[in-house]
Image (cartoon, grey):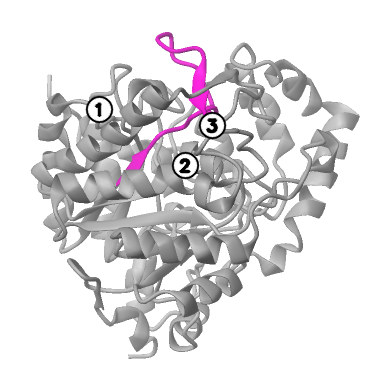
Amino acid sequence: MAFEPIFQPLAFRNLTVKNRIFRSNVSGRFDNYDGSGTQTRINWETKFAKGGVGAIISSFVPVHLRGRIVPNYAMIDDDRHIPFWRAVGRAVHEHDCKFILQLSHGGRQRDINGIEYPIGLSSTSKADPIHGFRCEAMTKAQIAEAVACFAEGARRAREAGLDGVELHGANGYLITQFLSSAINDRKDEYGGPLENRARFVLEVVRAIRAKVGSDFHLQMKISAQDFDDALAFLNMGPSGNTLAESVQVAKWLVEAGVDALHVSTGSFFPHPRNPAGADLPVEDLAKSYDTMVSSGERTFANFLLFHGVSGALARSAWNRAAGPADEIEGKNLPDARAIKAAVNVPVICTGGFQTASVITKAITAGDCDAVSMARPLIANNDLVHAFRRGEDRADKPCTYCNRCLVNVVENPLGCYDESRFPSRQAMIAQIMSVFTPPPFVS
């Protein structure tokens, strides 16, 4: 086999995955406003299982209603959701694919406020710098409640028969808001030096282990470097956590009971380096951002920013921070390698992967043990099957245009790069395919 390392099983302490390709966390607004799941989400996850990935990491799954980033995402905050996630797991397992549920809490970082909690919770009372969503610094009682919510979410995932859980500790969400020196401004035992900033996530890990035991898979997604100052025009201050600090956090996580690390980058989302793109699609942003205009203190200003001359300036600043488009694939490998050298558990790396030879080299060189991808699999659901056939890349690879993610706020998630399709009708058909089969037949 041309790319044999990709198809070697990966053994974790409590879980074995059939190959080294993970579908990373991504989803559309496919569910009900109250956090209950739908057939559409089952269809969404099943298409990637059919496509040959070894494991699917679910989208952002809130452990508390106040921690969701957008309405219409399935949640894990109540036992009533267990049957739905059991159905998701069964559908994915039919294709010899594992399903790892991502336990998540947005903190201050959101896309659209729900009606229930217009003000977020965080390590800080400072609004998020991108959209200006308001928040309040968590009390110790609220911290304890959040820790318990993560642990209960893990219990529910196990009861649903899923294969493991991942803590979303990257990309600016609540755990990052505690870990990051650029965000966390607390003066108590949860702020200040690194060991204090890591206290929250370590309490979460220990609470999960106390709830589900030591024989259930638990991994953690971490931003190896914050790059909090990536957008100079936002005046966001210091860069934040360094790679050396994240290496130390990774060691503590493993000591506390984490079975794997999933390496990403950036202290907010979207970030110029994550998901890195070939260009900032300001025209698409201008069309879809109107959904968010009333949500945060900066959203209307951002809406205006994406038009005309200011849109061109925003695009230029974003693209400069993102770096060259031909360096997107494997951008996080040096960070993954540093973390892998420091821990004795497998390391997964994310970041634009879609070339079999690049992935094979990363695994054989010891940079990581597996890779995760989202956009390239949205563009080519059967990419893993192509690798197995000996193809190094899809005939029409992902162009990293990020139109899929720009559209997701108000449109179904799918590939919106019309240049990859024979017609606009063909593109729409691909986007709408997630709604088949329907939830009922009339």
Residue 221 x/y as whole percent: 43, 54
Q: Nearer the viewer, residue 289 or 148?
A: 148
Instruction: Establish if 38 lies above or below 219.
Output: above
Instruction: Establish if 131 lies above or below 7.
Output: above
Q: Nearer the viewer, residue 72 or 369?
A: 369
- Residue drawn at 73 percent across, 36 percent down: 282
Q: Is residue 187 left or right of residue 138?
A: right
Instruction: Establish if 174 lies above or below 242.
Output: above
Question: Which element type, helix, strand or loop, lies under badge 3?
Answer: loop
Q: Is residue 301 left or right of residue 152?
A: right
Q: Amino acid at mark 3?
A: Ser
Mark 2 surroundings within 10 Å by alpha-carbon count, few (fewer than 14), some (14 through 19), many (20 or more): many
Q: Main secondary structure of the magenta part?
A: loop
- Residue drawn at 41 percent across, 34 percent down: 105
Residue 371 x/y as whole percent: 43, 68
Which residue does the numbered mark 3 point to in the structure image? 123
Mark 1 surroundings within 10 Å by alpha-carbon count, few (fewer than 14), some (14 through 19), many (20 or more): many
Q: Amino acid at mark 2?
A: Ile
Residue 84 x/y as whole percent: 15, 33
- Residue drawn at 34 percent across, 87 percent down: 4
Q: Nearer the viewer, residue 302 or 166?
A: 166
Q: Amino acid at mark 1?
A: Asp
Question: Which element type, helix, strand or loop, lies under badge 1?
Answer: loop
- Residue drawn at 48 percent across, 55 percent down: 222
